[in-house]
Image (cartoon, helix red, strand yellow):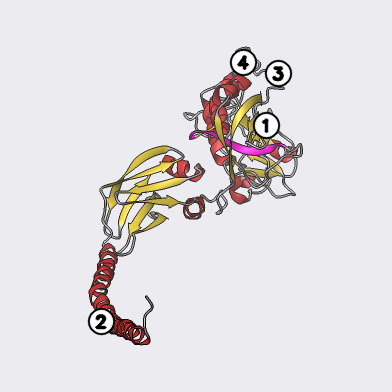
Amino acid sequence: MKEGPGERSTALRVRIDSVIRRSRLIPLVALLAVLVITPAILCLMSAGAYGQAAAGPAPRVSLGTDPGSGLRYIRIVGREAPAFPTVDLACDGKRWTLTLARSEDGAVYELSRANVELMLNAIECRLFLPDQEVTLAREQLWRAWAGPTQSPGAPTVLVGQVVDVIDANTILVNMGERSETVRYIGISSQENRRPPSPEAVPGEAIQANRQLVAREQVRLELDIVERDRDGRLLAYVYVADTMVNAELVRRGSAEVMTVQPNVRHRDLFVTLEQEARDNRRGLWADPSEPTTPTNVEPAPRPVAEALHGVNPSENGWACPPAQPIKGQYTTYTGGGRCVYHLPDGDRYSATKADRCYATIEDARQDGCVASRR
């Protein structure tokens, strides 16, 4: 049955009235939504702001050296930063605890010399506080604690695994995408020369090297010159926290051989070689080898007026070009005289001079005898 014109008109008016009534409710619904949601948002914002204010700025970690004691330290500063009784440090997987030293100007934690060396030689160090963890960048450590013989910038450090021990101071290292032949900086095994004594066994130096590094994970610390003329990588080699270069010298399995400008650890090597000589280890087992026992006083110097030559420069490590021969009065020779070293001698670079001479005759007139190497 079809609707008539009147019925259609009535239905249309009903629909229009319904739409008008709904449209009048929209502003009211929107207003109610605003009144309900806005306080909740304001409450959340207030809670967030309160939380940030309560937390305050994060503590700042600084590094320094005590001018009185020379000890290196880590200082934690910041407004209301707590002074924790202990904090933990971890470098390359080795972890230890530091105890609070003082708290007047921030929480200060002092480090031993061994720990500082470990940190400087590590790839990564982290400081663990009760509520957070702080990464100590290598560049930050080197800027703060590098010694006078060390460059202020952190040296390049590579990692790899030893796959072959070539000789007493050369190894083959797998570095992932490539393998490198690595030569130890600052030392020489001298195994190509005649053994210094009947007790010395040919090949024992390479055995000592193999004992230290065979199949080990190693860190390779580079110096200023990274390769020798044969293309070998030059490095100070570490297994955990032991520097293999230094350990071989300490055992008497190698001697110091300084080649400029790679001298970062030269003083350490010279000290360890003297220790090996004093205790007649390895290469120095022959009693005829010169040594400076710790219980022997330095030989008396001639009076100043009788001295020939000139004083050395650079704290004794370099002689002027016109007087290149190094005279070392503190070397014990059994006869109370000094030893002179020629520029082409094996021990020249590792010798700290007390006097510099232009000619051998000048050195001899001061009572010096020729070095055995």
Q: Quadrant of residue 372?
A: top right
Q: CA distance from mark 4 to mark 1?
A: 26 Å
Residue 197 in picture, x, y percent from top left: 63, 15
Residue 198 in picture, x, y percent from top left: 63, 12
User: Cβ–Cβ below 8 Å for labels 2 and 3?
Assistant: no
Which contiguous range is marked in magenta?
Answer: 232-241
What amino acid is labelled 1 in the image? Val
Residue 133 in picture, x, y percent from top left: 37, 50
Q: Residue under circle 2?
A: 28
What amino acid is labelled 4 in the image? Ala
Q: Secondary structure at mark 2?
A: helix
Of callouts 4 and 2, which one flags the residue occurring earlier in the amino acid sequence?
A: 2
Q: Quadrant of residue 291?
A: top right
What amino acid is labelled 2 in the image? Leu
Numbered disc in front, either 4 or 1 = 4
Q: What number is the disc on residue 200?
A: 4
Numbered disc in front, either 2 or 1 = 2
Q: Quadrant of the C terminus?
A: top right
Numbered disc in front, either 1 or 3 = 3
Q: Residue at x 49, y 45 (%)?
A: 120
Q: CA distance from mark 1 to mark 3?
A: 23 Å
Asked if residue 350 is positioned above or below residue 204 in the image, the reply reads below
Q: CA distance from mark 2 to mark 1?
A: 110 Å
Of callouts 2 and 3, which one flags the residue occurring earlier in the amino acid sequence?
A: 2
Neighbours of disc 4 within 10 Å: few (<14), some (14-19), many (20+): some
Q: Nearer the viewer, residue 335 or 64?
A: 64
Q: Looking at the image, can residue 308 be seen?
A: no
Magenta stretch: residue 355 in it? no
Residue 136 in picture, x, y percent from top left: 44, 51
Q: Residue under circle 1?
A: 369
Q: Residue under circle 3?
A: 194
Of callouts 4 and 3, which one flags the residue occurring earlier in the amino acid sequence?
A: 3
